[in-house]
Image: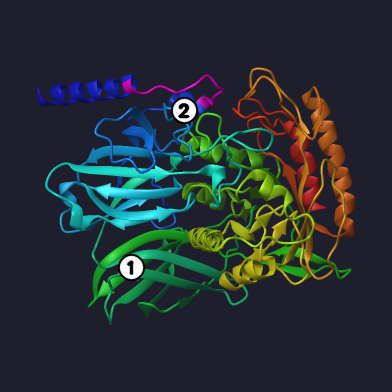
């Protein structure tokens, strides 16, 4: 009887969730949107590079309200929103933009599992755009500014018996303020897209010991055949010890111990290198001890790979991977979805774009003015694809971003804008340092908000000397800044500038357009840099560009980025439609052309 009653209650709960949620609007959607279960949203562990066995997912239906900025917490809410989809998205079930004059409120309840008794409880947010205040049981427990990086609060002191109440307030001015926002604007058109406000990555709870590990950052050195590992911790005392265990397919190959606060070097015998062709990953177990008693343990992974620059036989500086010249070819990947906007509808969908990029014969992705959830980078690590990571651009308006700097003069940002840029850029680097797939940092794109280029590039290289710095992809260029000179040219590949002291790359080209009826975001104003009517015509043009690109490689290019992975809103220059239902290019010919170019 109890089993029947429990089953009935679960069915009723699921039915209730379905009746409270449905996608908003009538825009195109991916096939994964049909698989959405509002009671089981993005259930995968959200932080694979540092995993603990116990956690609780808070995704699902929350109450929401949109109120004028400064208003008190609402007594009544407007309805239900499906977290973690941005409020503007179809999959949120809302499809509304709060705007600068309003704040977005969220509310839900949760219970702490009895098995967590005696542990500290961390409340994690994968990402919230942009300014966030968090309340637990009517107590403000913390705040955060930044739309692209995770943050957490220890909420243990504020928990009570039984049911807990969680309230989140978000303010997002989009393009009416200075914060990094990528391509979000209040009035989408052309290359500018729908705003993304509020929670857009997984919200979750995690029990940890009072003394616990907060981050593990491995840095490979293949020349010395060792890993340098930095472990950050919380609430430790003098005498506490960190132990690292490195494993290959479950077999321990090296161990090391260090006092907390000390970087540790660990040898890697029988070195196995990571590359797109052989993406081998080692497992890492990191433990924290007090008086020989384990306090905490996390499981992660790492890889041995090196990204560098060196001369070819003609003295031209080239990008190298693992000390070998290695041409990098990949698409500009903006990471937008017609149903979830910034948020892929499922983890399967998140991985799909990466796998198709590999299938197309590419070995690199330029992640364009957006930061993805941690799982996206883990998929890149495991599948084997290099990543160039952009800093999301920002400024007072898209026009301000684009045009202020082409006279060669850099902007003087207001102090709060500069401080915020530096803070968010550091948080992004800290987030992605453990991921071996990330090989290039790109602080600026096309002079959008570009400022103090030499200083920012120099700081970036100093903060992470293990990767290359592309100071301004297609932007204003400075001889003394960074490792790479990056030129954009549409539609065809072209060399317009070379720097003999850097690696030279073509950071954007292509943009071959093909509008496919039934798979368009909007009925009109769809565009590509050049436009064709059939898949064969698009493929012919792409292969023509690859032939031109081959000649530019001989003259100095070390990498190239094709625009782009998918259509995005009014842009129809993707290799796939925005809904991912149609591959718009002849895949076999694309793969053959790419493979031959890379191997050349």
Image coloring type: rainbow
Q: Position of residue 365 (x, y in %)?
A: 65, 48
Task: Give the residue number, with chain letter if any, for mark 2.
Answer: 95
* Span of residues in magenta: 20-31
Q: In the image, is residue 324 above or below residue 114?
A: below
Q: Residue at x 55, y 69 (%)?
A: 220
For the point 48% across and 49% down, which residue is it? 147
Q: Which mark is residue 531?
A: none
Q: For mark 2, does the 10 Å Cα neighbourhood hold few (<14), some (14 to 19), or many (20 or more) residues? A: some
Residue receiving disc 1: 287
Judge depth for marks 2 and 1 and give the one in front: 2
Locate residue 206 relative to residue 319 in the image: left or right: left
**Where residue 274 sits: x, y (%)?**
60, 59
- Does residue 216 sit above or below 17 in this rendering? below
Nearer the N terminus, badge 2 or badge 1? 2
In this rendered view, identify the residue nearer to me: 326 or 452.
Answer: 452
Q: Position of residue 416 (x, y in %)?
A: 52, 61
Which quarter of the rendered picture does the N terminus lie within?
top left
User: Quick check: is 23 in the magenta stretch?
Assistant: yes
- The majority secondary structure of the magenta stretch comes to loop
Q: Badge 1: few (under 14), some or many (20 or more) residues near its Cα, within 10 Å?
A: many
Give residue 590's position: percent from left, percent from top.
Answer: 76, 37
Q: Residue at x 52, y 19 (%)?
A: 26
- The reply to whether residue 202 is in sight is no
Q: Is residue 68 above or below residue 531?
A: below
Residue 458 sits in which quadrant? bottom right
In this rendering, would 136 be left or right of 313? left
Secondary element type, mark 1: strand
């Amino acid at each position: 009887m109890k089993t029947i009653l429990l089953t009935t209650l679960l069915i009723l709960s699921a039915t209730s969730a379905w009746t409270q949620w449905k996608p908003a609007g009538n825009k195109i959607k991916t096939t994964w949107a049909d698989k959405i279960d509002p009671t089981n949203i993005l259930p995968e562990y959200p932080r694979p590079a540092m995993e603990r066995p116990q956690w609780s997912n808070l995704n699902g239906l929350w109450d929401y309200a949109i109120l004028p900025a400064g208003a008190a917490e609402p007594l009544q809410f407007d309805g239900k929103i499906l977290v973690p989809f941005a409020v503007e998205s179809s999959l949120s079930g809302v499809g509304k933009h709060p705007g600068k004059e309003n704040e977005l409120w969220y509310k839900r309840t949760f219970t702490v599992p009895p098995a967590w008794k005696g542990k500290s409880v961390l409340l994690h947010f994968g990402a919230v755009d942009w300014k966030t205040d968090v309340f637990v049981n009517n107590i403000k427990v913390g705040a955060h500014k930044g739309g692209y990086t995770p943050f957490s609060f220890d909420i243990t002191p504020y928990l009570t018996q039984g049911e807990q109440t969680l309230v989140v307030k978000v303010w997002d001015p989009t393009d009416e303020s200075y914060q990094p926002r990528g391509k979000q604007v209040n009035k989408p058109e052309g290359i500018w897209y729908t705003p993304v406000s509020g929670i857009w990555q997984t919200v979750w709870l995690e029990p940890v010991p009072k003394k616990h590990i907060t981050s593990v950052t491995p840095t490979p050195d293949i020349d010395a055949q060792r890993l340098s590992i930095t472990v950050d911790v919380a609430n430790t005392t003098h005498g506490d010890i960190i132990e690292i265990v490195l494993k290959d397919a479950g077999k321990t190959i090296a161990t090391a111990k260090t006092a907390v606060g000390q970087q540790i070097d660990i040898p890697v015998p029988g070195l196995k290198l990571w590359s797109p062709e052989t993406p081998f990953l080692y497992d890492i177990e990191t433990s924290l001890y007090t008086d020989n008693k384990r306090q905490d343990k996390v499981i992660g992974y790492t890889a041995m790979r090196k990204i560098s620059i060196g001369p070819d036989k003609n003295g031209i500086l080239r990008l190298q991977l693992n000390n070998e010249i290695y041409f990098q070819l990949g698409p500009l990947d903006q990471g937008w979805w017609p149903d979830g906007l910034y948020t892929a509808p499922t983890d399967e969908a998140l991985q799909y774009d990466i796998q198709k990029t590999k299938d197309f014969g590419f070995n690199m992705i330029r992640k364009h003015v957006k930061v993805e959830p941690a799982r996206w980078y883990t998929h890149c690590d495991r599948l084997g694809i290099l990543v160039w990571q952009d800093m999301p651009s920002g400024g007072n308006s898209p026009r301000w971003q684009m045009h202020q700097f082409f006279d060669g003069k850099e902007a003087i940002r207001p102090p709060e804008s500069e401080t915020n840029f530096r803070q968010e850029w550091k948080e992004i680097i800290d987030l992605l340092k453990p991921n071996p797939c990330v090989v290039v940092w790109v602080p600026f794109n096309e002079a959008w908000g570009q400022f103090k280029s030499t200083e920012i590039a120099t700081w970036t290289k100093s903060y992470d000397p293990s990767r290359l710095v592309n100071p301004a992809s297609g932007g204003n260029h400075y001889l003394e800044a960074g490792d790479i000179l990056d030129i954009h040219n549409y539609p065809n590949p072209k060399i317009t500038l070379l720097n003999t002291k850097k690696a030279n790359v073509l950071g954007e080209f292509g943009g071959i357009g093909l509008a496919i009826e039934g798979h368009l975001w909007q009925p009109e104003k769809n565009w590509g840099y050049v436009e064709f009517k059939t898949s064969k015509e698009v493929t012919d043009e792409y292969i023509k560009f690859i032939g031109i690109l081959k000649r530019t490689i001989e003259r100095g290019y070390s990498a190239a980025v094709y625009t782009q992975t998918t259509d995005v809103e009014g842009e129809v220059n993707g290799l796939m439609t925005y809904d991912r239902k149609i591959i718009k290019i002849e895949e076999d010919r694309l793969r053959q052309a790419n493979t031959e170019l890379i191997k050349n």
